Every structure is written in C-alpha cells, then in structure tokens.
Image (cartoon, grey):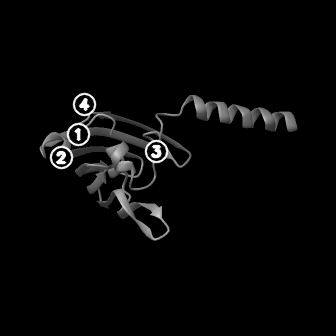
Amino acid sequence: MREKILVIVVFSLLAAVAFAQGPAMGVATVDDIRGMRLNPGYLGLGHGMETALFANMCTDSLSDIGIDNNHGFLINIEGLGLGYERLGSVYRWSLGAGFGDRTFGVGYLRMWDKSQAWGGGWKNGWILGMAARPWDFFAAGYSYESTPAVEGM
C-alpha cells in the first residue's frame, strides 16, 4: 500500500513539473483577479465582482518604510476588467472584457504602457485568451499576447 501511495505522489509531482507553464503561473489555473493579466478568458468565467489593491512594501531602513514603485489596482465587474499598475518606471493601464459561463470563457485585454525611458510616449499591446473549467478539478487555457509593449513585462 505504501508503494502505491509513493508512486502516486511521485507521479503527481512529476506531472506538475512537466505541465507547468512559465515562471509564474499557468494560464488555466489562475483563480483570482490576477488571472486577467495572464489569460483574459478568466474574465468570462463568471467570477462576479472582484477588486485587488496591491503594493510591495520596501524597507530602506527601520525609520523609512514605504511603498516601492510596484503597485496598482485591478477590478473585475461581471466580465469587464480595468487595471492600473506601476511596474518600476512603467505605468500600465488595462481594459478588458470577457464572456462565457462558469465552464468556458473567452476574453480580450488591451494594455497601454507609458515610461519616461521612451520620452513619455505610449506603447500598447493586447492579449486574447480562453479558459475552460468543465469540472472543479480540471482546467485548460490558452492565451496569445501581441508583441509585448515592453520587453520583459
């Protein structure tokens, strides 16, 4: 019996590593509002209304604790997504929409980026995605991103 459990655990770990996508998260398994940045199909899965406000705290010293240059907010209202992020010297606005039901969703996200490094000009990009979750234990997704507006983002 122990051997069977060990085989199942080892197989599960190997399968998780083999099917992992990217350095952060797979485009099918995101179940919170950050999913709209990875796969806009998330917006179509009927998550209702969600909001996120995030900031990274930095400590230069014990007397100087504050928010660094990575912060923003994300909002999803019944398939309509809006976001603002500051990622270092880049400011990003996002607007997206998705439709579907609790098992399948299709979405589109448009992004506008601005940075002083480009002379203050705007660059833009988009992501098209779909997500399927026919059962609670299974999810599949695909997203296609236009040429990134900023390399490395």
Q: CA distance from mark 3 to mark 1?
A: 23 Å
Q: Position of residue 13 (x, y in %)?
A: 66, 35
Q: Position of residue 59 (x, y in %)?
A: 46, 62
Q: Residue at x 23, y 37 (%)?
A: 149
> From this viewpoint, which residue is outermost toward the top?
18
Q: Amino acid at mark 1?
A: Trp
- Asked if residue 46 lies left or right of residue 23, the reply is left
Whether label 2 touches label 3, CB < 8 Å: no
Q: Amino acid at mark 3?
A: Arg
* Earlier residue among tags 4 and 2: 2
Q: Amino acid at mark 2?
A: Gln
Which residue bears the numbered disc 1?
126
Whether label 4 touches label 2, CB < 8 Å: no
SS assignment at label 3: strand
Q: CA distance from mark 4 to mark 1?
A: 8 Å
Nearest the viewer among 104 and 128 is 128
On the question of residue 146 being in view, the answer is yes
Which residue bears the numbered disc 3?
133
- Disc 1 residue crowd, few under 14, some 14–19, many 20+, Cα 10 Å: some
Tag in front: 3 or 1: 1
Tag in front: 4 or 1: 4
